[in-house]
Image: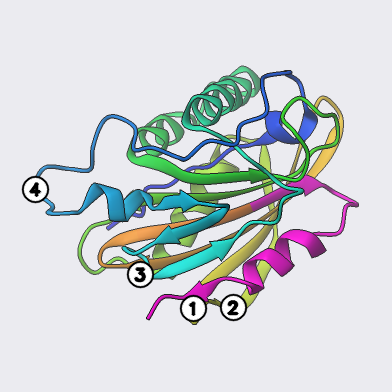
Amino acid sequence: MKGYYFCFCLVLVLGLSSISNGQRLPSPPNPAPPRSVSVDIVELFGELKDRTYLNRFFGFKLNIPDELTILDRTEIKLYNDAGADMIKAHDESGTAKLDDAVRRSINILVITKLPPGTVGNSAIEFVTAKQMAGVTSKMVLAETVSVMTGTGTFRKRGSLPTSKFGGIPFEGVDMESSAFGVPLRHRTYVTVIKNYALVITLTLQKDTPPDEFEKLLQSIEQLK
């Protein structure tokens, strides 16, 4: 039983492209979740109203400060594709699992500290992926680490203590990578709810404190 997940935002952090500032409501992409699973697609992807993100499937809401940027679906896909291509250019071996993980994973929310295209940017991503019955958060996290380190681009720094965001327990890992000589740090948190993994990843330059995004995670509220 494997957890299929991959999330990549080196391009966001480095600001290698100058696309428009996205402030639009995230909408479900294609394809939809597997047909064999009865899931309310709107609840799974959540909705954004007046900078408050609501996700009834996972049972939480998040108020997003005005100074942060919310990416739209077009921007998310652009950066994910560019990021995956960057990894493959580094090492073609070990990318088969990456391709499979990218295909199975769906970004439901991406927030950046600065507008896209800004050098030295940082990002927080919320990703979901369908899991087999019985898969746990630790299993998804282990598979995530395996996929990322298998590309030869990422290195595990250590495990993070179990954290609760909005009353939901997450398992975590601290990783690092680099792009064009810029060292990057990644904090990934995983939980599994109703056979779907919710994976939250913070990506920032290595020496940048994650205080703002950690504060954002601590502000997550559980829906009644």
Disc 4 versus disc 2: distance between alpha carbons? 32 Å
Q: Which mark is residue 163?
A: 2
Disc 2 on helix, strand or loop? strand
**Viewer-nearest of discs 3 and 4:** 4
| Real-space Cα separation, disc 1 to disc 4, in angstroms | 27 Å
The earlier-in-sequence mark between 1 and 4 is 4
Label 4's element?
Answer: loop
Q: Which residues are magenta?
A: 202-224
Q: Quadrant of the N terminus?
A: bottom left
The residue at which mark 1 appears reads as 169
Q: Residues within 10 Å of mark 2 (few under 14, many from 20)?
A: some
- Dot 4 or dot 2: first in sequence order is 4
User: In the rendered structure, are the residues bearing label 3 and label 4 in contact, judged by CB atoms less than 8 Å apart?
Assistant: no
Q: Which residue is mark 4?
A: 36
Question: What distance separates the C-alpha of mark 1 from that of mark 2?
Answer: 6 Å
Residue on which disc 3 sits = 136
Q: Amino acid at mark 3?
A: Thr
Residue 109, horizontal then vertical, whole percent: 51, 46
Q: Of the residues shown, which amino acid type is indicated by label 4? A: Ser
Residue at 69%, 48% in the rendered image: 155
The residue under label 1 is which amino acid type? Pro
Examine the rendered structure and indicate whether residue 40 appears above or below residue 150.
below
Which quadrant holds residue 159? bottom right
Q: Are marks 1 and 2 in contact (CB under 8 Å)?
A: yes
Q: Secondary structure at mark 3?
A: loop
Q: Nearer the viewer, residue 203 or 23?
A: 23
Crowd class of label 3 (few under 14; some 14 to 19; many from 20; radius 10 Å): many
Name which quarter of the figure residue 23 lies in: top right
Alpha carbons under labels 1 and 3: distance apart: 12 Å
